[in-house]
Image (cartoon, helix red, strand yellow):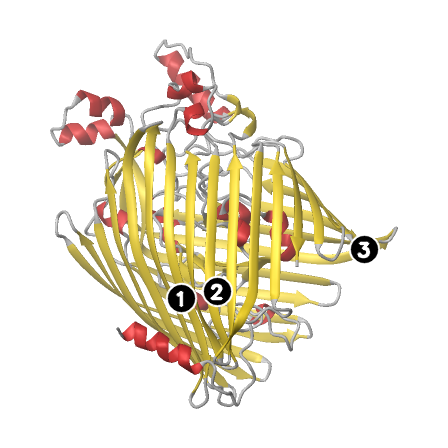
Amino acid sequence: MGFLLLTTSLFGSISAPAATAAVSSALHDPDEDVIIVTASPLDRPSDQLIAPVSILEGEELQRQLRGTLGETLRREPGVTSTSFGPGASRPIIRGLGGDRVRTLTNGIGSIDAAAASPDHATPIEPALAERIEIVRGTGLLRYGSSAAGGVVNVLDGRIASETPEDGLEAAVRVAGTTVDNGIETSASLQGKLFELGGLDVVYSGQVAYRDAEDIDIPGFAESDILRALEEEEEHEHDEEHEDEEERGTLENSFQETLSFANGLSFIGERGFFGFSVQRNETQYGVPGGHGHGHGHEEEEGEEHEGEEHEEEEGGVFIELDQTRVDVNGRLEMDGPFQRFDIFAGYADYEHIEFEGPGEPGTVFSNEGFEIRAEAAQQQRGNWRGATGVQYRGREFSAIGEEAFVPPTETDQFGVYTFQELSFGEGVIEASARYEHTEQLNTVTGVDLDFDGISAAIGGSYPLAEGVTATLNLFRTERAPTTEELFSDGPHLATSSFDIGDASLDKETALGIEAGIRFANDRASLSINGFYTDYEDFIFQQADGTTGADILLARGEDDEEELEEFGELMVLNFVAEDARFAGVEVVGRADLFEANGFDVSTDVVVDYVDAESDSDNLPRIPPLGVIWGIDAVTGPLALRAEAEYASEQDDTAEFELPTDSFTVANFYADYQITDRVTLSGALLNAFDEEARIHASFLKDVAPQPGRNFRIALRLTY
């Protein structure tokens, strides 16, 4: 009832006359040619933020679009992906993933089961995004202390915050890819319907569809390192590898996705209020032969090779459905507060893991709700700030043979504040957050409470014209997740037997980040270095035992279970002190003009090192470098790009190293008219084998091979 009264009051107020100017768009300030970063509560331009930030929009977003959020963002500074096949890939930031990276849609969490396992997809459609922001730093306390790695905010405009300039905006995109015989289509529409009581009523509609077969790969599905290890083991046991090895195609890597949304906004002089309903339906294969009853040497689906999708694969596939409702509003005010914002989202999520056609296995469901209310203070001299409250709740269950996490209920309440003080051209920003988390195991009745206090202080100061230095200090406390506390059972997606620890305490991080930025009319350079010291860092650690050891120790000697789960590696959730250190470099320069082409170059370098008191931490990405050259003339834009990842041999115990790779990509965009653009891309042009070290599947599922993509985009 309180939420209803609050939103009704907001709706009734936005049409009132305002003493101030009309509310500015959350995306662009019409009076200044700068981008406003909505992931920051103080709406600062991106080049004035203390925290490092990456923004993908426009042509660059269209170039980097892939089928999942993780693969779309993998080339951004400090970002890699879980890369669990084409259907499931989440972003990893600075070596941290899972619950430590919050993925948001228009400022509210994705409300799914993706953090529970890397084979669970995030129901966010990159093709519908208008802009994607990646932010690290003090602003993260706005979304929860769990966001230690960073925040990814996907802005898709499904709730309009301003009336379209000409009353109507529309976009259509059609694309095809050769590596998977894929087709992608997406469309969006936003238009003013009518006026009601002094308010513009604006409709937003979106739809996207993707259908792709198994991807082509350059060579064997298994890495040279794994194949050599298997041959050595077979030789030691006088065995012969009789099965034909998977080569040229990554079996069971298909995907099919349908996403659509409708939204309605009421926009007035003092703000807006809107809501949307979104539906996502996805089916995708789980590649790798890593479990689910079909190991590396046994492919259950060979008899189905002539059929399509799951029937063709005969392997494990996932059917995912999510229905989501969002509410968003802003009210500009006089008095002590400048504005009031509200964000809310509810989602009903379910996915079913099928062992084969007509063989449903484990059912995962997650019903969740999140709301955040925020008030920004009126600026007083050189001081301004924002304060907010947040609630997140979810009911999670997994039912079936592979339900390695019991049904749980989670409630989290947080209150936070950001305060900024400017002096001359310098800025000091401080933030703090209190958070209470309750985790209830509804099977055993175990009820755990955690209270955390997090704080950060940072600043920026111009050293010279075009040169700015930044410094940020922070201390955060994170409550353990459901999976870390209560996991207990076979997790075939990761070929592991997961065991949680209900005695785990809060994870505490103490860190520092320093940066320097340079920019003039022809070049820019940003360098950021960070160091974080963790007390009781929670991660999965192998101890050399197997599922058979656990089952037999518990007196469970069922032959079928021992055969299916006996060889799984035991991964215990443990807490140890750990350290993360790294650097990110982003540079760009205009080079010269030749034959009518303006030529420029850019480079991204990132590196992170992470270790606990006992060993290197697992799945930490290696040194990465992306170097590109752009040439633009009139309606034609060309780009050549080289992506390099070094060898990763600083591995944890029982973790295999990963070879280096270099991949070349070429892009061309031609603007046929002001509203029609034809784009082509040759990705992995030389068909190189590439494996992402952060992926659980790196040794059984490489990245796609050579891929030609063509796309046509129309806007109105």
Q: Residues within 10 Å of mark 2 (few under 14, many from 20)?
A: many
Which numbered dot is residue 159? 2
Mark 3 or mark 1: name the one nearer the start of the chain.
1
- Up the image or down, 550 lies above or below 429; here it is above
Select label 3 or label 1 by which is in front: 1
For the point 47% across and 38% down, the residue is: 256
The picture places residue 554, in percent across and down from the top left corner, at: 13, 32
- Residue 481, horizontal then vertical, whole percent: 28, 53
Question: Circle 2 — which element?
Answer: loop
Residue 483: x and y in percent read 27, 47
**Residue type, mark 2 in image:** Ile
Taking 303 as reference, is 462 above or below it? below
Circles 2, 1 touching at the beta carbon (< 8 Å):
yes
Kindly identify the amino acid type of the residue bearing the numbered disc 3.
Answer: Gly
For the point 61% across and 55% down, the residue is 171
Crowd tier of the residue under label 1, counting other residues whose Cα lies within 10 Å: few below 14, some 14–19, many 20 or above: many
For disc 3, the marked residue is: 634
| Residue, disc 1 | 327
Cα distance in 3D space between marks 2 and 1: 8 Å
Q: Nearer the viewer, residue 544 or 358?
A: 358
Q: Amino acid at mark 1?
A: Val
Q: Secondary structure at mark 1?
A: strand
Helix, strand or loop at disc 3?
loop
Q: CA distance from mark 3 to mark 2?
A: 34 Å
Residue 613 visible in the displayed image: no
Q: Position of residue 63 (x, y in %)?
A: 63, 48
Label 3 close to label 1 by CB (< 8 Å): no
Quadrant (top left/top right/bottom left/bottom right) for the N terminus:
bottom left
Q: Nearer the viewer, residue 497 or 406?
A: 406
Which one is in front in this view, the residue at disc 3 or the one at disc 2?
Answer: 2
